[in-house]
Amino acid sequence: MSPQRIAIRGNLLDFTAEPAWGDTESGAVRFRPDHWLLIDAGRIVAVQADAPDAGWPREDHAGRLLLPGFIDTHVHSPQLDVIGSYGTALLDWLETFTFPAERRYADADVAEQGAAVFLDALLARGTTAAVVFPTVHKVSADRLFGAAQARGMRLVAGKVLMDRHAPDGLRDDVAQAERDCLDLIARWHGTDRLAYAVTVRFAPTSTPEQLAMAGALCRDDPTLYMQTHVAENRDEVRWVGELFPQARSYLDVYAAAGLLHRRSVLAHGIWLDDADRAALRDAGAQIAHSPSSNLFLGSGLFDWRAAEAAGAAVSLACDVGGGTDLSMTATMRDAYKVQALAGQRLTAWKALYAATRGAAVALELDHEIGSFEPGRLADVCVWDWASEPVGARRMAVARSLHEKLFAWITLADRSNLVSTRVAGVERYRRPVTGVP
Ligand code: GUN
Ligand code: ZN
C-alpha cells in the first residue's frame, strides 16, 4: 500500500465547466456534500458517497469544505519585503521600493531563504500552484525552482529579463540573459512539476533586441510559458507608446516580438482596447487579473466582462507586493469589489472557478490540477466554514449554496485553512494552538 493512500471525507466543491457571468445557480458547480475523496500515490482515484473499505486510511473532515488547491497566476516571490509600501503609483513604486528589494536576491542565501518563506506562505493560504516572478538574477530562479521541487509543487517561473531602465545590479544583457535562460530551461523545464516561463518584466525594461531574443526562445520551444505585465497604469502605457512608437498598442509590442501565444500570462490588462482583447483571444493568451494590486497602486478597474465577451481567458492573481495579501480568498473579494466599482457583480462561482479550474485550463494544466476529476494530482485543501463567531453566525443564516460560498469568500482567511495537500502529501497543517 502506498504511504500516500488516503481517503478524505468532507463537502467537495469543484467545477465541471466555466460558470456564466451573473449565474448564482450555475450547473457548472459540482457540490458533493459528505463524500469521500480517494487519493492513491498522489493522484485522485475516485470520489464516492460511501465510505471506502477498511484498507483505506481515513481522514474525517465531515462538515468541512474541500476545494482544489488554489492557482495564483501572477505573484513576485521577492516582493514579500515590499508589501504595504506607502504612497506611490506603479513607476515610482518600482523605483522607490521594489527594485532596491529585488537587488538582495543576487545573493544565493537570500534567494534560497526567501523562496522557502514564500512557498510555505502560499501553502499556508491554500495556494498549491503559482506562476511566479523571482528577480533578474539566475540564482533567484534556480533557488525558487529548487524550493518548489522540494515541496512537490506545480510552479511556473523564470529569470526576469531586464536590460534597460533598471538600476545597477538589476540589469542583464541579451547574450548573458539568453545563456541563463537556456541553462535554467535545461535544468528545470519539465522537471517534476516545474515549467519555465520566459519572463519579460515589462516592455520598458527590455530593449527591442532582448524582446526579440525572448520571442525566439518561445518560438523554439512552444511548451515554454511567457509571463509579463501589460497595460497596468496610464503613465506606463504612455511611456511604452514613447519607447515603441511603431506599435499599435502596448500589447502589440509583445505580439510583434512573438511573445503572445497560448502559454502567455499577462498581468493586469486594465488599459486594453477591443483589438487587444481580440488579439488575446486569437493567441489563446490569458490575463492574470490582480485586483488587490490594482486597488493598492491605484492602477484602475479591470474590465472582466469585456475580456470575457471577447473570448479572452481571465485568471486571478495576488500580485504581491503590489498586491497586499498572498491569500486567494482575499484576492477574490477584492475582485468582487473591483467589479462592483465598475458596475458589475462577480459571483462566487466565477471567482472560485478562475482560481481553480479556470486557471488550470488557461495554463493548459487542467489534466493535472484545478478539479477533483480522477487522474488529477491531489492538490487539495480542507477549509473550515468559519474560524470564529462572526463567520459562524454568517454561515448559519446562509440560505443558498451561493450565498454561503460568497460570504465564505468574503470572510475566510488563513485561519480557516485546516490542511493543504500537494500531490497527496500534507504540506501544511493548522497548528492545534492556532495560526502561527
Ligand atoms: N510592472 C513591472 N514590474 C512590476 C511589478 O513588479 N509589479 C507590478 N504590479 N507591476 C509591474
Ligand atoms: Zn506583477
Image: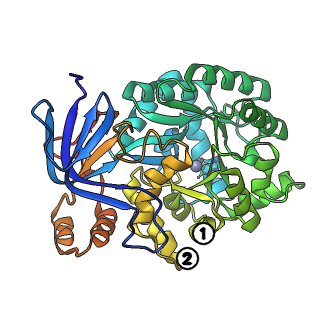
Decide if residue 354 is in sight here: yes
Under 8 Å from ligand 1: the CB of mark 2?
no
Decide if residue 84 is in sight here: no
**Residue 105 shows which numbered tag?**
none
For the residue pair 252 and 39, the one nearer the viewer reads as 39
Is tag 2's residue or tag 1's residue first in the polypeptide sequence?
A: 1
Query: For the point 65% across and 54% down, which residue is it?
Result: 92
Residue under label 1: 303
Query: For the point 52% across and 55% down, which residue is it?
Result: 315
Vertical order, 227 against 178 (above or below):
below
Residue under label 2: 342
Query: For the point 42% across and 37% down, which residue is it?
Result: 118
Assess disc 2: are there few (<14), some (14-19) or many (≥20) residues with their C-alpha within 10 Å of its C-alpha.
some
51 to the left or right of 368: left
Occupied quadrant, residue 26: bottom left
Residue extending furthest toward the left:
54
Q: Where's residue 38, x and y in %? A: 24, 39
Q: Where's residue 414, x and y in %? A: 29, 51
> Identity of the amino acid at label 2?
Ala
For the residue pair 230 and 220, the one nearer the viewer reads as 220
